[in-house]
Image (tube, rainbow, N blue to C red):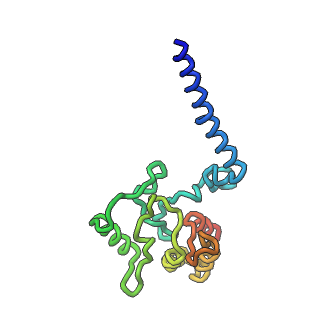
Amino acid sequence: MQSLLASIRIAVATMLICVAGYATAVWAVAQAIAPDTANGSLITRDDGTVIGSRQVAQAFTRPEYFWPRPSAVDYDGAGAGGSNLSPTSTAVADRGREMVERYGATAENPLPADLAAASGAGLDPHISEAGALYQVPRIAEARGLDRTRVEALVSDGAFAPGGFLTDSRIVNVLELNLALDRL
């Protein structure tokens, strides 16, 4: 009986240290170093209503908005994950053809790859700068805006994800659409 009680005490102490203590320490460090990221990178209205997150894609389908990458999980943040389909899968090819048709891409005006292919998690909130610029004519026409104004918005929102380590630039679709609404 003595060894059973000792074992229970050791198990409880281990759980308190390894579960509660470690989780609390990680939470405290995250809150101290990067509170916005630790709390979900939420974007809110002036009244505090949450609009979305900088880290999770949302489905935009109206012509006056930038559209995100396709999502293998239908933009469901609770079910992030890829499709696990092979690149040679007919389902992947069909989705690619559907996206090419949706954007009206042609051989003379090819669709940037990120607009036809889902990201690994299915929730990537960014598209390439080229992917955003590809959508400018549709958005400018739908909103009655000058194309150069929309292009400038894309350029202003674009950034290099690795800082100086890369030449490729990306834009956050939600932030870009919110900037469009502010125009």
Farthest residue, direction left: 90
Where does residue 99 sit, x and y in percent of width and height?
38, 71
Q: Give whichever of 146, 96 is nearer the camera.
A: 96
Residue at x 62% of width, y 40% of height: 23
Where does residue 102 sit, x and y in percent of width and height?
38, 72
Quarter of the image for residue 168 reads: bottom right
Q: Is residue 64 above or below residue 151?
A: above
Residue at x 39% of width, y 78% of height: 104
Image quadrant in which the C terminus is located: bottom right
Q: Give whichever of 149, 167 is nearer the camera.
A: 167
Farthest residue, direction top: 1
In the image, taking residue 67 as reference, residue 92 lies left or right, namely: left
Residue at x 64% of width, y 71% of height: 163
In the image, taking residue 28 as reference, residue 142 lies left or right, namely: left
Quarter of the image for residue 148 reads: bottom right
Residue at x 56% of width, y 58% of height: 55
Q: Give whichever of 41, 26 is nearer the camera.
A: 26
Farthest residue, direction front: 3
**For the image shown, how many numbered marks are present on the structure?**
0
Q: Is residue 51 above or below residue 130?
A: above
Farthest residue, direction bottom: 108
Q: Give whichever of 58, 34 is nearer the camera.
A: 34
Where does residue 83 sit, x and y in percent of width and height?
37, 58
In the image, taking residue 59 as reference, residue 18 lies left or right, namely: right
Quarter of the image for residue 12 reads: top right
Where does residue 66 sit, x and y in percent of width and height?
51, 69
Q: Is residue 173 above or below residue 24?
A: below
